[in-house]
Image: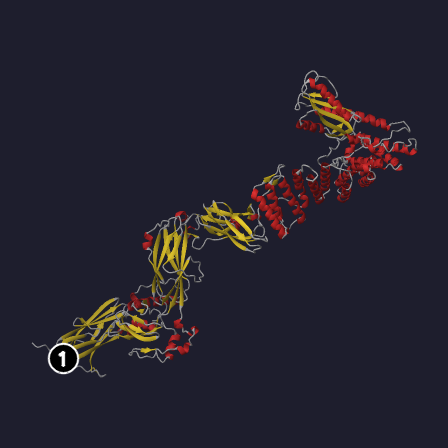
């Protein structure tokens, strides 16, 4: 016997062997359909008996194995079922002859046989025969199973008769010697009358009877015969048959302990049904515990006292195998015994002992095996190792079987079988073809062995002629084993991959193998490795903004509750993913990836783009080349959303080494991301901004679209022209312009930036490609007051600014102060410091679908101005003028530039100042009625304190005074004009001097007003009318008042003469009375008469009668009456 049956198990000793074979030409599929129905009758209850007969079917069985039927009766073919086709009666004789020829092959051992004929009809088919069954067709044979059962019962009758014959053999010493085929030549010439020979014959026969009893369902009788045989054979050292007797004893004990069988799920037996109590005396299937052993041991001892315990079964198997090992020609028997013992140990969960049996089986020499037999042997060893839980060992032998399929000695290597077996080894080496399994924690298994196995899969798939499989396995190796591959191997693997992909590019499709196994795609998430993914906001000039009044329109109002924890929970989850900025439909959006190249050579990544969902998105692929082991490297991927809505960035796609990969972020480990969901708003227009000044790159804390820089002198104004061009695809329907100061450390007077959008607004809507110009005035007016340090320096130079006489003009030139400055930049005084102003112009515009949804964009222009000092006012004072409605404002002007400056004012001569020169300037100004200025209501939000309200009042008064002065300066050499302001220079005292008193007094002589050095003319002897008018501009009533007119003469030498009773007389009283005056005017009149010629002055004195009666006391500045100068001439000649 040269070919082992690896599928054998211990319970097969209880079965009878029936061969089912086709005779003649039978379609293979039809034959196996009938064979499957026949094999379903594997267990038959014998009629009129409580015993069952177990049948083992084979469709192929070597006749030489049948010769070992006396050694172990389950190897003997006792039944033959032939399946044939016969179309006509003429073919029947030939068919019948073939059937008889087939019977002759196993004729020496056959108990019975059957012939199943399909297709024959007619007279022959109607004959009633026990050994032949006729069926019209393969699908018209309903009673096949019943005929097989009848056939099995006939076999049982023969088996039972043979058992009885052998068991009751009374031939005495004349017992036939049973032999195995290789023993027959050894027993030629032996003394058949010796006691030793007779014991050998008896022992072998006892063992044979035990086999027959076991097949006939008499378990207890079999155990008794096996024990007797063991004793007899051990006495004569018949080791081969002793091993067979021990194996039979083990098989019978296994059948008793494990009625479900040891062949596993595929070969599991049906436990026998309940039987009469007396039948249990022979053999009882028993109830199984958790480990498969009968639990009721007390009854078992009584029923099967000869049965081995589970531990003894294994010991006896070891003895039997050791006995078999003494015979070279019993290698197949020894190997099969090892397999049976392993199956029993698997049931008992004794894996280590089972591995010892398998290890012994590996080294059993079966002579020259064919390649197919070697493959079968290694495959069975693999299955048995898998049965006992030795996964890696199982994979090892499965791989050996795979390599045997393509051995060099095979003329046609079976690469498909090799590939299939290699795939079956993967679980044993902790290897899965799903790359997701390798992203979960640490690496499992031996990487070196796994790489070797993957290389073998690549080679096998290539030899199969399937380059797509080669690309998939090589990609998997590179992706999952990258950390374990040396630099040289990385180069070799990538070169091989590029060679394969040049013929068959790799993709993301699932590859389905013929056996149904699906190979998932392998994205290259490590080529390159991504460490972070960040969605970038649009540039500041392109970001959409929501109109504030529309922010709440899209909020859900479905819930009637103010607060709902469920809603808040869902919103919280959404916030974890959604980003707080928006993208715009039709605009290029960016996602930044931080990647690095782990390869020792330059990595070329082609067609790298974004994978998105939610809205239609046009990805703009990029190609990059990463240096070897580059470290973190920023890569920006761009695309354009074509519709509005919510878009999710799911990952990115690449093409590396010819393999197209879709890398999803959820499958990437150790990747930082701040969210992948962003809202895309409807399309908006785009503006491009250019200016008449060159761009500047000054540093600013604001996000600006563009920047310009200027350098102006304090008080100078420059025009800035801004051109706005629509470079988008939507019309610009609205345009607004606002500004804000960025640094407000220095006090500013007037508007820094001014513009008029009326002309630009008239050109809306602005079509794509059109442009509009906006003129912006840049005016700088900082404080013109001289600082304390400047006044100190002027005093140090010998010029007493604060102590100058009011009447004398200051016309000194400052001395050079080079010795104080030291010639260094750090020694410059404060008045020469350049100050910086910065403001931002914001253009707010919208149009298109985005405007309908309430979105707009902002374009910002930063304006940076370096302000150089021009002129300073170091001192300000006032002098009264000849008119009560006017006064003189005295300004000490200092030129802080290095150039000659002209200073001018309204109705005044120009003042020329050289560099660092200070001069005094006198300007006659009309007094101002500050009460007539518009009064602001106190706004608690704008003016937090009374101090701020007072500052605002002073600012308005200073602005009013400054507008009347019209102070300007011009740098002569550059022709650069500018304004000067006294707003920050005027103090409270000066303002009071410049204020028009609330009570205005007007004096008229003969109906003509007397003011501003006007001399009234009259003649001696004529009555002169004198009229005094009072105008009350104050908030409340004033008066009553008493006015007294006192005449005098000025001799121009400091002497005033008031004794003029003889020169001037009043017609009536010289005292005028004015009653209380509310808002409005009051007039009092009188007359006087000059008695002689001369120049006379009238001093009008007043008395506030209201103060003596407990009224309020008015300030003296309210009673500024003009002096009256009257010149009396001679009487006119008649």
Quadrant that contains the C terminus = bottom left
Residue 120 vertical position relative to residue 1006 in the rendered view, above or below: above
Residue 41 in percent (x, y) is at 72, 28
Residue 651 vertical position relative to residue 885 in the rendered view, above or below: above
Q: Secondary structure at mark 1?
A: loop
Image quadrant in which you'd find residue 1122: bottom left
Residue identifier under label 1? 1091
In the picture as drawn, the residue positioned furthest to the top comes out as 123
| Residue 336 visible from this viewpoint | yes
Image quadrant in which you'd find residue 323: top right
Residue 991 in percent (x, y) is at 32, 71
Residue 947 in percent (x, y) is at 39, 68
How would you rate the neighbour count of disc 1 (Cα within 10 Å): few for under 14, some for 14-19, many for 20 or more? Answer: some
Quadrant that contains the N terminus = top right
Position of 341 compared to 1126: left or right? right
In the picture as drawn, the residue positioned furthest to the left comes out as 1134
| Residue 560 visible from this viewpoint | no
Residue 839 vertical position relative to residue 639 in the rendered view, above or below: below
844 and 777: which is toward the camera: 777
Residue 808 vertical position relative to residue 332 in the rendered view, above or below: below
């Amino acid at each position: 016997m040269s070919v082992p049956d690896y599928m054998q198990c211990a319970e097969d000793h209880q079965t009878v062997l029936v061969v089912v074979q086709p005779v003649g030409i039978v379609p293979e599929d039809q034959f196996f359909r009938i064979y499957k129905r026949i094999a379903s009758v594997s267990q038959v209850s014998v009629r009129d008996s409580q015993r069952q007969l177990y049948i083992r079917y084979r469709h192929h069985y070597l006749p030489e194995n049948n010769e070992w039927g006396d050694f172990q009766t389950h190897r003997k073919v006792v039944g033959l079922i032939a399946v044939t086709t016969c179309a006509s009666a003429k073919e029947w004789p030939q068919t019948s002859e073939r059937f008889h020829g087939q019977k002759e092959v196993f004729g020496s051992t056959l108990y019975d046989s059957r012939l199943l004929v399909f297709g024959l009809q007619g007279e022959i088919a109607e004959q009633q025969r026990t050994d032949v069954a006729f069926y019209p067709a393969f699908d018209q044979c309903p009673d096949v199973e019943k005929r097989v059962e009848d056939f099995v019962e006939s076999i049982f009758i023969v088996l039972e008769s043979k058992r009885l014959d052998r068991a009751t053999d009374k031939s005495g010493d004349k017992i036939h010697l049973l032999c195995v085929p290789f023993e027959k030549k050894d027993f030629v010439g032996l003394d058949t009358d010796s006691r030793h020979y007779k014991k050998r014959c008896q022992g072998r026969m006892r063992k044979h009877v035990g086999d027959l009893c076991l097949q006939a369902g008499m378990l207890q009788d079999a155990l008794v015969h096996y024990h007797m045989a063991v004793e007899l054979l051990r006495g004569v050292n018949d080791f081969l048959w002793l091993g067979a007797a021990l194996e039979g004893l083990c098989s019978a004990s296994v059948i008793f302990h494990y009625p479900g069988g040891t062949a596993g799920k595929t070969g599991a037996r049906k436990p026998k049904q309940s039987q009469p109590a007396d039948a249990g005396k022979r053999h009882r299937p028993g109830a199984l515990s958790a480990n498969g052993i009968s639990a009721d041991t007390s009854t078992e001892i009584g029923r099967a006292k000869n049965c081995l315990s589970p531990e003894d079964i294994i010991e006896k198997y070891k003895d039997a195998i050791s006995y078999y090992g003494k015979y070279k020609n019993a290698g197949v028997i020894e190997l099969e015994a090892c397999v049976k013992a392993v199956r029993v140990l698997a049931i008992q969960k004794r894996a280590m002992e089972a591995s010892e049996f398998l290890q012994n089986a590996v080294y059993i020499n079966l002579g020259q095996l064919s390649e197919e037999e070697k493959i079968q042997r290694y495959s069975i060893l693999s299955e048995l190792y898998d049965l006992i839980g030795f996964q890696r060992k199982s994979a090892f032998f499965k791989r050996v079987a795979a390599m045997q399929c393509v051995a060099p000695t095979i003329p046609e290597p079976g690469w498909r079988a090799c590939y299939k077996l290699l795939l079956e080894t993967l679980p044993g080496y902790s290897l899965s073809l799903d790359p997701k399994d390798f992203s979960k924690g640490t690496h499992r298994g031996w990487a070196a062995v796994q790489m070797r196995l993957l290389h073998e899969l690549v080679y096998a798939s290539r030899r199969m002629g399937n380059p797509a499989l080669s690309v998939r396995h090589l990609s998997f190796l590179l992706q999952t084993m990258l950390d374990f591959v040396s630099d040289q191997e990385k180069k070799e693997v990538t070169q091989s991959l590029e060679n394969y992909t040049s013929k068959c590019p790799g993709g993301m499709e699932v590859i389905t193998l013929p056996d149904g196994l699906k190979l998932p795609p392998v994205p290259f998430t490590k080529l390159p490795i991504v460490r972070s993914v960040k969605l970038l906001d649009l540039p500041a000039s392109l970001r959409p903004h929501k109109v504030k009044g529309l922010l709440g329109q899209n909020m859900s109002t479905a819930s009637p509750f103010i607060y709902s924890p469920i809603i808040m929970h869902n919103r919280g989850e959404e916030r974890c993913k959604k980003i707080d900025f928006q993208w715009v439909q039709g605009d290029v959006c960016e996602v930044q990836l931080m990647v690095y190249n782990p390869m020792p050579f330059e990595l070329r990544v082609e067609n790298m783009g974004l994978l998105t969902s939610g809205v239609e998105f046009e990805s703009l692929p990029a190609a990059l080349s990463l240096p070897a082991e580059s470290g973190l490297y920023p890569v920006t991927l761009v695309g354009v959303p074509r519709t509005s809505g919510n878009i999710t960035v799911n990952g990115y796609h690449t093409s590396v080494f010819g393999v197209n990969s879709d890398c999803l972020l959820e499958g990437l480990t150790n990747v930082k991301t701040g969210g992948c969901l962003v809202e895309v708003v409807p399309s908006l227009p785009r503006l491009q901004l250019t200016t008449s000044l060159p761009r500047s790159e000054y540093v600013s804390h604001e996000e600006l679209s563009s920047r310009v820089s200027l350098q102006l002198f304090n008080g100078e104004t420059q025009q800035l022209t801004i051109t706005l061009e629509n470079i988008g695809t939507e019309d610009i329907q609205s345009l607004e312009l606002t500004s804000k100061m960025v640094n407000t450390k220095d006090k500013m007077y007037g508007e820094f930036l001014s513009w008029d959008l009326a002309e630009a607004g008239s050109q809306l809507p602005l079509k794509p490609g059109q442009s509009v110009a906006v003129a912006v005035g840049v005016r700088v007016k900082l404080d013109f007051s001289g600082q304390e340090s400047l006044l100190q320096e002027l005093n140090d130079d010998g010029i007493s600014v604060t102590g100058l006489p009011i009447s004398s003009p200051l016309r000194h030139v400052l001395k050079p102060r080079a010795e104080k400055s030291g010639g260094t930049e750090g020694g410059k005084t404060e008045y020469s410091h350049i100050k910086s102003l910065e403001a931002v112009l914001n253009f707010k515009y919208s149009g298109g679908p985005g405007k309908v949804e309430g979105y707009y964009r902002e374009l910002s222009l930063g304006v940076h101005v370096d302000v150089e000092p021009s002129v300073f006012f170091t001192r300000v004072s006032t002098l009264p003028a000849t008119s009560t409605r006017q006064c003189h404002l005295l300004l000490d002007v200092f030129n802080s530039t290095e150039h000659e400056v002209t200073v001018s004012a309204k109705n005044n001569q120009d003042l020329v100042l050289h560099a660092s020169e200070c001069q005094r300037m006198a300007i006659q100004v009309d007094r101002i009625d500050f009460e007539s200025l518009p009064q602001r209501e106190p706004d608690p939000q704008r003016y937090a304190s009374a101090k701020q309200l007072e500052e605002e009042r002073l600012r308005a008064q200073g602005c009013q005074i400054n507008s009347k002065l019209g102070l300007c300066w011009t740098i002569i050499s550059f022709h650069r004009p500018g304004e000067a302001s006294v707003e920050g220079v005027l103090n409270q005292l000066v303002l009071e001097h410049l204020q028009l008193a609330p009570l205005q007094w007007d004096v008229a002589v003969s109906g003509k007003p007397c003011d501003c050095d006007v001399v009234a003319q009259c003649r001696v002897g004529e009555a002169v009318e004198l009229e005094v008018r009072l105008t009350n501009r104050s908030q409340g009533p004033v008066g009553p008042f008493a006015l007294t007119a006192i005449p005098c003469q000025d001799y121009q030498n400091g002497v005033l003469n008031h004794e003029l009773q003889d020169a001037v007389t009043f017609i009536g009283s010289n005292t005028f009375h004015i009653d209380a005056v509310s808002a409005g005017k009051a007039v009092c009149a009188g007359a006087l008469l000059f008695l002689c010629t001369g120049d006379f002055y009238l001093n009008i004195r007043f008395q506030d009668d209201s103060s003596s009666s407990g009224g309020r006391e008015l300030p003296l500045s309210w009673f500024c009456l003009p002096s009256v100068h009257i010149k009396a001439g001679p009487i006119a000649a008649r």
